[in-house]
Image (cartoon, grey):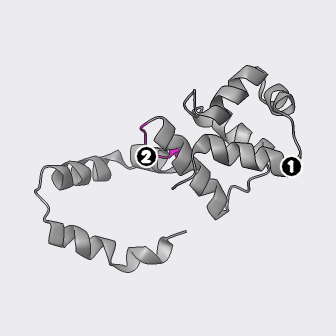
Amino acid sequence: MQQTFGEFITEKRNQLGHKRIYVANKLGVSATYVRDLEKGNRPAPHSELLLRLLSILEIDRESAEFFYALDLAAETRCDVPLDIKTFLILNQDIFYKLLRKMNNGSISSDDIDVLKNSKFNRYDR
């Protein structure tokens, strides 16, 4: 079973020996808000607050753990991970068209397999 965003941040907070109130004060939110994040009663925060939370939890922005956290956070919001969303928006003239063609079947599953198995795999984190 995959870890949830709440389980992930709880684990990281506990590893650092931080109390919820410490994290809450650093973020400028209530301890109840942090508890709700950890229990899965709230979706992960967006953008700046999420990045501040990960920084407080000492998660390096270049680490696989950082991107894992972004993925888990996005799942709580039924959204795209922050780093990918920003990239898609900045390159929307290319990717919106490509994704729509993939979605409506204009690009075959064989073409998609070629892309998945291509040199792009070397960029996997």
The amino acid pointed to by label 1 is: Leu
For the point 50% across and 42% down, the residue is 74
For the point 63% across and 40% down, the residue is 6
Outermost residue on the front side: it is 1
| 120 in magenta | no
For the point 62% across and 63% down, the residue is 64
Q: Quadrant of the C terminus?
A: bottom right
Secondary structure under tag 1 reads helix
The amino acid pointed to by label 2 is: Leu
Q: Position of residue 91 (x, y in %)?
A: 38, 50
* Numbered mark located on residue 36 in the image: none
Dominant secondary structure of the magenta stretch? loop
User: In the figure, 76 relative to 36: above or below?
Assistant: below
| Mark positioned earlier in the residue sequence (2 or 1) | 1
For the point 85% across and 27% down, the residue is 21
Q: Position of residue 62 (x, y in %)?
A: 67, 61
Mark 2 Cα within 10 Å, few/some/many (few <14, many 20+)? few
Instruction: Determine whether, in the image, residue 18 is placed left or right of residue 117.
Output: right
Secondary structure under tag 2 reads helix
Between tags 2 and 1, which lies in front?
Answer: 1
User: In the figure, 92 relative to 120: above or below?
Assistant: above
Say if residue 29 shows up in the picture. Answer: no
Q: Position of residue 68 (x, y in %)?
A: 58, 56
Say if residue 52 shows up in the picture. Answer: yes
- Which residue is identified by label 1? 16
- Which residue is identified by label 2? 90
Mark 1 Cα within 10 Å, few/some/many (few <14, many 20+)? few
Which segment is the magenta one? 78-82
Q: Position of residue 50 (x, y in %)?
A: 64, 37
